Image (cartoon, rainbow, N blue to C red):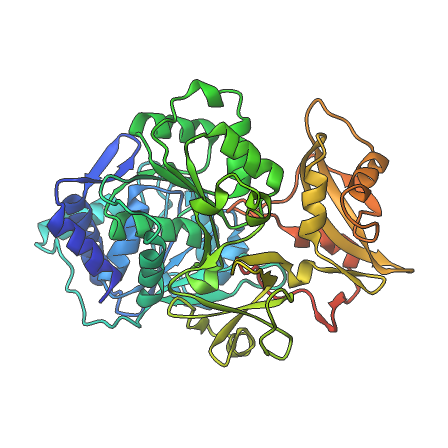
Amino acid sequence: MHLSQLLAKAARERPADVAIVDGAERLDFAELAVRSGRFAAALQGLGVAPGDRVGMLAHNSHRYAEFLMGTWMAGAVVNPVNVRWTAAEVAYSLDDCDTRVLLVDANFAPMAADLRRRSKSLRTLIHSGPGTAAEGALRYDDLLVQAQRGDASAAREPARDWEDLAAVMYTGGTTGHPKGVMLSHRNLAVNAMATTAAFPDTFDRVGLIAAPMFHIGGCAQWLQLLVTLRGRTVLVPYFDELKVLDAIQQERVTDTFMVPTMLKRLIDHPQFRAYDLSSLRTVLYGAAAIDATLLAAAMAALPGVQFQQLYGLTEASPVVCALPPSMHAPGPKQARRLRAAGFPTASAEIRIVDPEGCELPQGTPGEIAVRGPTVMRGYWNKPAETAAALVDGWLRTGDAGRFDEEGLLHVQDRLKDMIVTGGENVFSAEVENALAQHAAVQACAVIGIPDAEWGEKVHAVVVSRPGEAATAEDLIAHCRNLIAGYKSPRSVEFRAELPLSAAGKLQKFQLRAPFWQGRSRQIGGTSSEPAATKK
């Protein structure tokens, strides 16, 4: 079975139902299948063979969905490109996995000439959507028309296997070059099916995708909504508070996924309460840690909406753990439960291990290891990194965590973000949760920086809330009232904003780098800076 076969099934069973809403454009399942088939035929006409890589550098649109499905129909492999990357970074990802065909929309057409110069593998540029195309680029819509005229509205779908490679998805890359995570059709399909189990009803779902579709979160959400639930997908090109609010109101959206940064920006928007959001049933959140204050504010701002946290990483397609709505219910255990990532999904086996890979008892913190049908095949052309990540069938996530007495997984930190100060281990997430409870803190990040006496000291980077003020001394004293003194910040730095990835995740390595330049930072005797961000 292939992912494109799941779309074909939806097109047979619900051909006239709206599949995608993209601004003023609407495609039903039959139209989406036909357009995807024509794109597949166009790729084959360009010489794309099964297993070849096809890239796309663009914001969300219905053409992005067609790119994914059409590439899979042709038997090829998708390489979704991060829209925040520079031309040098894009060229690296293209050349690393020998991507010869690249789709770009008008936003990135100016980069195309530079990419032609930089990339050794790029042969064909396709301009997706309206706007001025780069010189020498083929037009996407023209290719679909030519495929239709040539009586090739459906691709010659090659024989394929469930384990065939479906995607090479590059992680953000915290140091060095990003790594291409190899995901199979089975990886992505099983993830979609496992996460769908949380939804008792299906066909009336209207899901909003505000996360970028180049990211595993946006891609996986689309597969879940469109292919498995066979509900309607509403797309916005990128996250914008007013675009999201308008889409929820106009399209009567029932479900959406947001990273904490998006959720905060949404509920803090001055026009938030002017919109009718009564159709919302479920808000999924994840991809980064959420502080208790923000989660409480979001639940209060959206009463009656069920919240569900998802924890995962690109290397696991991505979801391995979910905190269901029932665990968000008020009660004596609510505060503790809301600090958890949730229970393992049906497709993931999780255990906590020590550095040697031995399983640790309940309650003991260690590294989170995952096994199951959604775990990646490995990193593209990086056997050493693959061997380090996949040990005896287990994916070593690089996250520190523990299981509690209810079987809930608590993700305490990235191992690389753990601070060792005076021989004591400090999880930065715990300090960030304490800081976030101060009224003057809008956003914060905690890192370890070198210290002659303590080895490392706890350093906080804070974005102040407009209209509120607090000194470094105020914030340090606030933390000391909530957590142990050795965990509390010893220094505080104020900034206008924190560095975020395209997916809205905090990029701590950018904060850490100036302090550790020329030094080798170690945690627990092992390097704390792996080559890529995992989640």
Residue at 69% x, 66% y is: 528
Determine whether, in the image, residue 247 is placed left or right of residue 392.
left
- Residue 513, image x, y percentages: 73, 55
Q: How many marks?
A: 0
From where the camera sits, is residue 119 visible?
no
Residue 517: where, in percent of width, then height? 77, 59
Quarter where residue 364 is shown: bottom right
Q: Is residue 132 above or below residue 303?
A: below
Identify the residue at image location x=17%, y=65%.
157
**349 and 247: which one is in front?**
349
Camera-side residue: 523 or 175?
523
**Does residue 486 appear in the picture of this structure?**
yes
The residue nearer to you, when weighing 204 against 247, is 204
Viewer-proximal residue among 513 and 452:
452
Find residue 6 and report its horizontal and vertical position in percent. 21, 57
- Within the image, what quadrant is residue 21 found in? top left
405 relative position to 272: left or right = right
**Position of the N terminus by quadrant:** bottom left
